[in-house]
Amino acid sequence: MVFQNRIEAGRQLAEKLRAYKATKNLIVLAIPRGGVVVGKQLADFLGCTLDVIVTKKIPAPGSPELAIGAVGPASWRGKPVIDEELAAKVGADEQYLKFKIENLKFEVARREKEFRKGKPPLDLKNKIVILTDDGVATGATMAMAVEIVRQQEPKKIIVAVPVIARDSLEKIANLADEVVYLQAPELFFAVGQFYREFEQVSDEIVIKYLK
């Protein structure tokens, strides 16, 4: 199945979350930028708040695409998530991690300020959190987002995405309390292959949806 665009995918996904409609203490947290378009459809359908979780991956030395951890929203005062085993394997020592984390904290704070426009810090304690994106390929970003959200002691974390790679599904299911999806194909090259229209989402659109 190929979706026309993120809006259509979000609307179809919302139907699978119908049981949560009008639930108290429910919030949709989207991973920017593409996830915000999907998240907007979910929040409108469910009648709850839409917000963003801004994270930045900690890259491995010499391999910027390989994530060895992530830094979460500065306003949460949570700890960075680090895959200790992978960090040791790729030679990311304490000094390297400290340097990267400090730099990424500034970047996360800047992005959060840009998107959230001075809203008070999110309080997710005892809330039902629906974490969403336009798709999950390797699962690294979503896995780290789940771990960062878990630090806030929510009542439940639901990962809801239109499409998730079959081999990432088990990993995410082990971390989240529930995973809701429309398809989980074995043959998965990139999220964009499941959309006819998959244009870059601008910061302006993200800000507009979050108003």
Image (tube, rainbow, N blue to C red):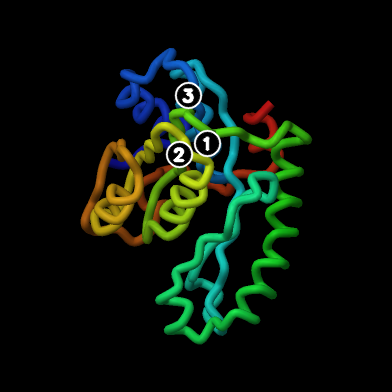
Amino acid at circle 3: Leu
Q: Say which residue appears at 45% left-offset and 39% top-offset.
A: 131
Circle 2 residue? 131
Q: Residues within 10 Å of mark 1 (few under 14, many from 20)?
A: many
136 to the left or right of 71: left
Q: Residues within 10 Å of mark 2 (few under 14, many from 20)?
A: many
Q: Position of residue 138 (x, y in %)?
A: 37, 61
Circle 1 residue? 29
| Residue 59 can be seen, yes or no | yes
Task: Tell which residue pokes out farthest to the left in this image.
Answer: 186
Q: Is residue 188 above or below residue 26?
A: below
Amino acid at circle 2: Leu
Kindly state the secondary structure of the residue where label 3 is placed.
strand
Q: Quadrant of residue 177?
A: top left
Q: Which one is earlier in the sequence, the residue at label 3 or at label 2?
A: 3
Circle 3 residue? 26
Q: Residues within 10 Å of mark 3 (few under 14, many from 20)?
A: many
Q: Rounded to the nearest whole Å, what is the CA distance between mark 3 and mark 2?
A: 11 Å
Q: Rounded to the nearest whole Å, what is the CA distance between mark 3 and mark 1?
A: 10 Å
Kindly state the secondary structure of the residue where label 1 is placed.
strand
